[in-house]
């Protein structure tokens, strides 16, 4: 039976002002449930700055700070499900769960209620995070990739989390045997090099080649350092996928669609001008990469930004490739 418990944050690595990786140890005297790479768990904090749903002047609902009669921001508990980025073998051997999180920005630039609280963690003075002792979800290789010889994982931002767990577990399991002839391709994009969590570890796993892995990291705001790095690509994940499959940038498609309808294309042209052009790392061979996208044997798994995932679905459908995305729901403890 799922229960509410309180864990302790044993490490906190701030990658940028809005991105972090942290480890959570279980409630004293207990262990986390067994799980499979790709699953998620509900986390909870008690000091979240609450919001309320209000109707705007345009008649549309939005969220605003929930203020009490004294003018103070109301504080309360908030829970949300997060994909686990640690591999199951790491949890079995070392006890922790690991998470790769972003400080969410909601409407009117108000930060996400739970992530705002998480980013105020200050171990060891403030190091407690609640969780529900139940790990759920079917975004696993066994469920979503069974029967496919080529598995393409596309992670945008912290959408890398379930794929990091999968790749680390595959690497661990491959030490005891082969990978069944399946090839795995991981595309991960974030804004900057510093925000590419697990980058060095994933490069090392790819280099070891215990199983067939091709890792393609990319940044959407490249610097001179990134442009000189032979292992670094450029562009957003969906546009990088478009580039691999010979499609125009999404921003260019939006211009063409607006023009065809006789609409103003100025805003779309501005977006196209600002976007980083997709390019593979110079160490990655395009011909070899495209061989891993045979529609009859390939599935594309994606997790991350909803807009990017919607475009990745469109790309997969255009090419007749099976598409699967990560979905989750809040897991609550059973009522007594």
Image (cartoon, helix red, strand yellow):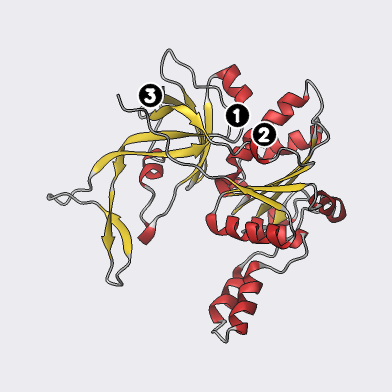
Query: Local crowd at mark 3 within 10 Å, few (<14), some, or many (≥20)?
Result: few
Residue pictured at 83% horizontal, 35% vertical: 181
**Percent x, y for residue 229?**
75, 51
Left or right relative to 192: residue 122? left
Give the residue at x 55% y 81%. Answer: 266
Nearer the observer, 142 or 122: 142
Report which quarter residue 272 is drawn in.
bottom right
For residue 142, which numbered disc appears in the image? 2
Q: Residue furthest right?
A: 287
**In the displayed structure, would residue 263 be above or below residue 334?**
below
Q: Quadrant of the C terminus?
A: top left
Q: Height in image: 109 above or below 262?
A: above
Residue marked by disc 3: 3
Answer yes or no: is residue 297 visible. Answer: yes
Per the model, the C-alpha gap separating discs 1 and 3 is 20 Å
Element marked by disc 2:
helix
Q: Quarter of the image containing the N terminus?
A: top left
State the separation of the CA atoms marked 2 and 3. 27 Å
Query: What residue is disc 1 on?
Result: 36
Which mark lies nearer to you, 1 or 2? 2
Contact flag, marks 1 and 2 (Cβ < 8 Å): yes
Residue 300 appears left or right of 51? right
Disc 1 versus disc 2: distance between alpha carbons?
A: 9 Å
- What element does badge 3 sit on? loop
Residue shown at the point (70%, 53%) measured from the top left: 226
């Amino acid at each position: 039976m799922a229960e509410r418990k309180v864990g302790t944050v044993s490490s906190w690595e701030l990658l940028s002002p809005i991105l972090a990786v942290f480890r959570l140890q279980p409630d004293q005297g207990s262990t986390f449930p067994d799980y499979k790479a790709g699953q998620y768990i509900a986390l909870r904090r008690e000091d979240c700055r609450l919001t309320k749903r209000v109707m705007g002047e345009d008649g549309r609902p939005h969220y605003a700070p929930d203020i009490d009669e004294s003018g103070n921001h109301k504080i309360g508990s908030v829970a949300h499900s997060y994909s686990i980025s640690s591999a199951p073998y790491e949890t079995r051997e070392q006890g922790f769960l690991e998470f790769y999180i972003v400080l969410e920005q909601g409407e009117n630039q108000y930060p996400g209620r739970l992530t705002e609280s998480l980013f105020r963690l200050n171990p060891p003075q403030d190091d407690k995070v609640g969780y529900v002792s139940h790990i759920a979800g079917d975004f696993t290789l066994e469920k979503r990739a069974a029967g496919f010889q080529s598995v393409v994982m596309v992670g945008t931002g912290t959408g890398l989390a379930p794929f990091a767990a999968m790749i680390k577990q595959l690497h661990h399991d491959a030490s005891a045997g082969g990978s069944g002839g399946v090839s795995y391709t991981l595309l991960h994009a974030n804004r900057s090099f510093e925000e590419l969590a697990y980058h060095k570890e994933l490069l090392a796993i790819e280099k070891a080649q215990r199983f067939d892995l091709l890792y393609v990291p990319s940044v959407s705001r490249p610097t001179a350092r990134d442009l000189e790095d032979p292992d670094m690509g450029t562009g957003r994940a969906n546009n990088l996928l478009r580039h691999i499959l010979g499609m125009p940038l999404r921003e260019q498609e939006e211009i063409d669609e607006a023009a065809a309808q006789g609409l103003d294309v100025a805003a779309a042209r501005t977006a196209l001008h600002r976007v980083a052009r997709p390019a593979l790392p110079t160490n990655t061979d395009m011909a070899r990469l495209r061989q891993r996208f045979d529609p009859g044997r390939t599935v594309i798994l994606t997790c991350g930004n909803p807009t990017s995932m919607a475009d990745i679905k469109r790309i997969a459908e255009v090419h007749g490739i099976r598409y699967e995305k990560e979905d989750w729901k809040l897991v609550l403890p059973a009522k007594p």
